[in-house]
Amino acid sequence: MNILVCVKQVPDTTEIKIDPVKNTLIRDGVPAIVNTFDAYALEAAARIKDKNPNTHIVVVSMGPQNAINALKECLAIAADKAYLVSGRKFGGSDTLATSYILENAMRKIEELEGCKFDAVFCGKQAIDGDTAQVGPELAEHLGYPQITCALECEEKDGRFEVIKEGEELNMLIGIQAPCVITFTKPGFDPRYPSIKRKMAANRAEVPILDESAFPDIDLTRIGLSGSPTAVKKTFVPQQMQDGMIIDEGTARTSTVKLAQILSDKKVI
Amino acid sequence: MEAKTKDLWVFIETKDDGSAKNGGIELLNPGRGLADKQEGRLVAVVIGSNVGRAVEEAAQQDADEILVIDGAEYSPYTTDAYVDAMYHLIEKYGPTTLMIAATLNGRDMGPRLACRLKTGLTADCTNIDIDENTGDIAWTRPAFGGNLMATILCSNTRPQMGTVRPGVYKKAVAVTPHAEIKKEAFHVEPGKIRTELIKVIKNVTEEIVNLEGAEIIVSGGRGVKGPDGFELIKALADALDGTVGASRAAVDSGWIGHAHQVGQTGKTVAPKLYIACGISGAIQHRAGMSGSACIVAINKDPKAPIFGVAHYGIVGDLFEVLPILTEEVEKLRA
Amino acid sequence: MDFRLNEDQLALQKMVREFTDKEVRPIAAHMDETGEFDEELWKKMAELGLFGILAPEEYGGSGLDHVSLCVVMEEIVRGSGNMYNWLVTSNGPNTGAILLYGTEEQKKKYVPKTASGEFRCAYAITEPDNGSDTRSMKTIAVREGDHFVINGTKTFITMATLADRILTTCKYVENGEDKGYVTLIVDRDCPGLIIGKDEHKMGLRGTSLNTVFYENCIVPAENVLGEVGKGMEPATACLSEVRVSCGAFAVGLAQEAIDLATAYAKEREQFGKKISQFQNTQFVLAECQTKVDAARLMTWRAASELDLGNGDRLYGSMAKYYSGEICNDVVRKCLQVFGGYGYCTEYPIERIYRDAKIAEIFDGTAEIQKVIISKAIGIR
């Protein structure tokens, strides 16, 4: 069984602050982490490997050079091999272009590893972009069936059974291999790296695939030229200007006033 | 592909019983205005099984045309059937814009469809407008867990696509239906549907919490201090016929189940009233509830960020305030 | 001479720090209050590999060096001092002595499962009447055919309630004659092994400290560790190692105290300003940090000597004695920064103060360390 896990190194958005003067994000000093949802995808792959030790887990990330840190963290946690896809021409890619590059990367990795992936696991979304598009778009490029918002996944006779999150009830869905599955937060915590794996991961070689690894890639479909969407502007969400603090002196009087206001506004 | 018309399409997701989910119906509201500005028609696309009711609901929302694909293979939702069906329709009719409600299924189908169409999709939008310079749709959405808003354009490919957060737009007042209803015969062979629903999982232990559809949510955070504190939250929620929500801190501490979590790694909600108790208001939580119509915050710390998004706030101890509020609500509703 | 941690050690430090913040700190107060054993936390730490840091890879450990163990210890006790006990019962003599003196079967039987956290261990030398004066111990083991019979009482045995085995050192008596000492691996299910009461303690309340009774306790002969008659050797083989860990424990507690006091001082206002702006506060904390840095370097140096194969006891003793002493001084001063709040259990500094005292006592009192140091410098 061979599983490719796509991961992204992202800033820890719980640590991001806003510059009150410039009204922009302060990105300096914000620690970089493995995208939270991708960690769930890696955990899902690790659990399949717990049951079937013959499972080969490869992680791939498209990003700048320092994304190697995220890849090494994945090696320390559960992955057997890691690849970084990084090149100047890839910069500026939106989700459509990114997923196209990842499709090419996957085919290349299959060639280098001498295997065919039975599944591609991704996190549901990246906590910086929040689009949740790359997984399904990659599935479309590959022509593979997909399941999004998976909580848990088991391998059964060459296909997968996935517990998928629903709006009200969860569902057990069967999917043929090869397939793409994107993961959301499950009821269990992803595992920690072990010390042994961490030391080994620090020493591991992570091959870098740049443009030269993909001689046949269509350059018009990558980078800015391959991106149908473009950011027109960004801005920091406005604080509530006219929020009202109710202070009538005591907890009781303030609360009674609140209830009255909400009732008058027909909110309750 | 090239746009053949200036029409604006809204995808109407349906339920198993053939009625429409709110997300799509709501979008016909802004859809009407945008279609007019784009000088095109407002078209609702209904896909499902026995969807008569959904068609009616869409017609009441001032749609000019309703395209209907009705077949047993469309219930329950599968990626393959819906993407194939939508692709067929879009290829045939070439709309300029497609809006989809950002439900779980919408966000499953949208990107795959956009990719097949080689066009741009903007996800989870909280605002849609027309860009003055280009006349394109300007899609505005949160990024970085809600720390940053971005406005996106898709100028060179068609259709321009976006998924829109449910609850951001409200359903318009019903009008006399005048839509032309077109039934499209498109069927997906069973062999082409590569996933199968084995069973729906009846939650024996984990409760079913419908936060996304809730009108009133009372939410507890770190300030609730433990599972006992959630009893107070629940009492107020019950008095309001509302649902109990929670911040990630409360869920991670094991005080309440993950099904109640509101925020970036939980659910996104847009109720009429959101009462945040003992929640500091970290960005990731706000990302999940800032679409609420009326936000009330109760927190001991006057500097808590939650007060920056609340319409009304009380700086106080929730253990004091909540029982009083519950009492007052019961009185007012009696 | 490079005093910096290498890349691996830095990565390890970061890893354990993150783990401690996420998993240990949140439960520290509860553990202190209830003394309950957190099975979930044990499992997580086992998965990380924290119980097999020194054990060689071939026996299921991570095969790391003593400096690395110091780094891990310092980080994790900052979450809860009890973690010292969790780590040293596995990483100490129960791994080290068995590796040095055990037969191949014993090594294979015990070391991997200790490293993996599957076994929990304790080690027993101290007795009610024999603390520092170990050699006069009164627990006696005699051989009877294919087994040994132990009679006696051991006291202050950390985590005996949870232990799957207790490494026990006894006087060895043959035909009524005193023939030295013997160390035995006493499995929990040995008949006659009775775990007695858990002491009600000042600190490290999250782990038990038991009296253990051996009443005609029968132990199979294959459980002798090392040579019969020479049982003091395995018992004392890991002393330097353990003392380095004691030093790291003291350094970790002291550093945590300084960080807590610093953060508090920056928030607390009196007389119109933050108390961090008073020179007294600044100078006291500066002195504390200097002492902690010195202690830290001493423990690293002692660890480094062990890594270089130097079995000399001097450095371990100095590190333990000094770290223990400054730790108590530093923690006391840091608590003072908190004023009345430092006396309240709601503030972690209160627990750290109670935990810190043991640093001057356990695994060889400060006085015993001074005996060793005086000998080493030739004054004794």
Image (spheres, coloured by chain):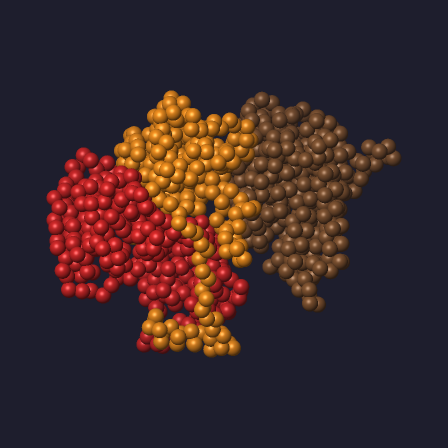
Q: Colour of chain C?
A: brown
Q: Is residue C66 above or below residue B325?
A: above
Residue at image position (69%, 64%) is C273
Image x and y of residue A79, in percent: 45, 32
Left or right, residue B248 beside residue C329:
left
Quick one: quadrant of the N terminus of chain C? top right
Residue furthest right in the image = C379
Residue at image position (69%, 44%) is C251
Left or right, residue C140 beside residue A29:
right
The chain in red = B
Left or right, residue C154 beside residue B145:
right
Q: Colour of chain A?
A: orange
Q: Quadrant of residue C148?
A: top right
Q: Is residue B12 visible?
A: no
Q: Quadrant of residue B269?
A: bottom left
Left or right, residue A254 beside residue B67:
right
Image x and y of residue B245, in percent: 39, 59
Front residue of B156/C122: it is B156
